[in-house]
Each structure stands twice: as structure tokens, then as C-alpha cells.
Amino acid sequence: MNGEINKLIAMLFEDASIREFCAKHGLQDEDVIMAIGKFIIQKETNKLASGCSPDKCNVDPNGVHTELIYRDGKVELQSVPCPKFEQYEDYLDLRYFPESEEFLNQEPIFNENRALAFSKINKFLNEYEKGKFVKGIYFHGPFGTGKTFLMMTLAKHLSKKGVKVFMAYYPDLARFMKSSISTGELEKIIRDLKNSDVLMLDDVGAESNSAFIRDEVLGPILQYRLHENLPVCMTSNFSIAELQNHFSEARDKIDFVKSARICERIRFMMSEVALTDKNYRTGIPYGKKA
């Protein structure tokens, strides 16, 4: 009988984390035997966990692991989040984007042409974590240069740290806000846009511009977040200077003063980063023919 127990304990101690746990708390063989079932569960969890990835947890579909703890003289198991599985859904409010795993889990490509973009992302993460005022990022460039996926990279890093991020495809958001005036939903979504920890608007300038959205929605949201030191990030095919022309061409009238005011807020609140190296959807560098 003792021989079987010794073999079982030796099998458990093949797991380095179990050995370290027992050594840390000064546990002897008899202590392990008293909680043998918990140690077996943890060894199996650790074995499965070695194959976990950002898009799949091998232990549990919801990304829940077990962890050994020593409390009041007893060995117990407690539930902990999978350290590899990207459980950002509770903190990332994603509106009007595809919900496919390919979109959510695709990672942007790093190269020297994108060094400034990644530098700005890292600076944002570092300064936000320190609780400092941090300027958002305004990514702009032609179609297919990866603006959205760079923004998604930042959003996922923030949400995994418990930061509530509201990220919306702006043309559809603007369309929804116009249609929601009569339903009473407009004020609620404006409150969400104003108060999220970090606001990200994708493809600004692709919407059908209107004085109402510009002056009664976007302007007050930016002003509120500026006053409250809440970061805003944007992507666009337009530079900020080009965006000013877009905002001045409302259907009802051309208003350069109001569009200039909006863009001054954007310049103050965000660092402008141009992306022009190539179209990552076609693989063709900009400036060259297919």
C-alpha cells in the first residue's frame, strides 16, 4: 500500500508547480495524502493548461482554471482566470463590427513602417496604467493599412486589464444615432460614449456627414471627455486636416467654424499617426500598381 502511495506522490511531484507549492508551505507526504484528490485535479489542470491559447482555453470553455492554496492549515482549490485566454469580452463593448473569431483574434503585423504606431500604443498603455492623462491616437491612412486592427490591439490590451472600452464602427454608429432620435435610445448611447473609460471610433469620415451628428452628438461627446480627461482614439482615411473639410460639408450648410472647432479638439486630444506602407488586404504597397 505504501509503495502505491509513494508512486502516486512521485507522480504528482513530476509537476514543478506542485513541488514548489509543497516546498513553499513546508508540506510533508502525509499532508499531500490528506488532500490527494485536490493535488490530482491540479496536476491534470496544469497538464491541460500548457496548451491554452489566446482564443481557446483547454481547461474550461469559459477560461476558468484551478489553483492550489494553503489556508488555515488545509490545502484547497480555488478558481482563477486562465492566464492565456483573452477574456476581454466583459470590458470591450464592440459595436457594429463582425463578431467572427478571425476579426477578434487577428493580430497586426509589426514592421519598421509601423514602429511609430506601436510606439504610440505602448506609450498609451504605460501612461494609462500609471493613471496619467494620456492623449489618444488618431490613426489615418488609405484603405487596408491595418488601422482598425491596430486599434483593436490597443482595445484588447486595455480590456484585459479591466479597462472598459467602447469601440464602434462610426458610420453605422452615426446611422443608428440618427434613427434613434424618435425611439428615446439616443441619450442612452450618448451617455455610454461620454462615460466609457476609453472611447474608440473607427472609420471617422466615412459617414454621411450632418450638422446634427457633428454639432449635437460628436462635439458634446468630445468636449465632455476632454473636460473629464477621458481618452478618445480614432481611425480614418483622412488626416485631421482632411477631416476638417469633411465635417464642413454638412448637407444643410457649410460651416467651417464648427468643423474647425471639432478638429481642434481632436488635435488636442489625440496624436496623429499616418499609416501608408501597404494595403494588407491585397499585399500591394501604396504607390505601386497591382
Image (spheres, rainbow, N blue to C red):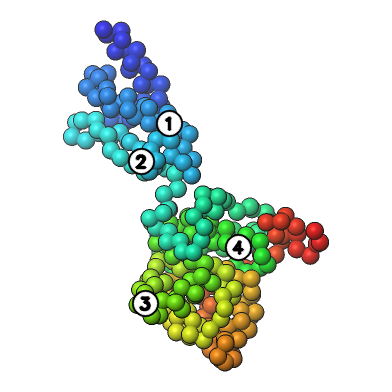
Q: Label 2 near label 1: C-beta < 8 Å?
A: no
Within the image, what quadrant is residue 243 found in?
bottom right
Residue 212 showing in the rendered view = yes
Q: How far across and how far down the image is residue 19, in percent?
A: 36, 25
Residue type at the position of mark 1 = Leu
Q: How many marks?
A: 4
- Which sits in the foreground, 72 or 245? 245
Quick one: label 1 or label 2, which is nearer the N terminus? 1
Q: Label 4 near label 1: C-beta < 8 Å?
A: no
Q: Residues within 10 Å of mark 3 (few under 14, many from 20)?
A: few
Residue at the left extreme, as displayed: 72
- The residue tagged 2 is 64
Residue at 33% across, 36% down:
66
- The residue tagged 3 is 183
- The residue tagged 1 is 48
- 37 shown above or below 8: below
Q: Residues within 10 Å of mark 4 (few under 14, many from 20)?
A: many
Q: CA distance from mark 1 to mark 4?
A: 36 Å
- The residue tagged 4 is 147
Q: How far across and how far down the image is residue 271, in percent?
A: 57, 71
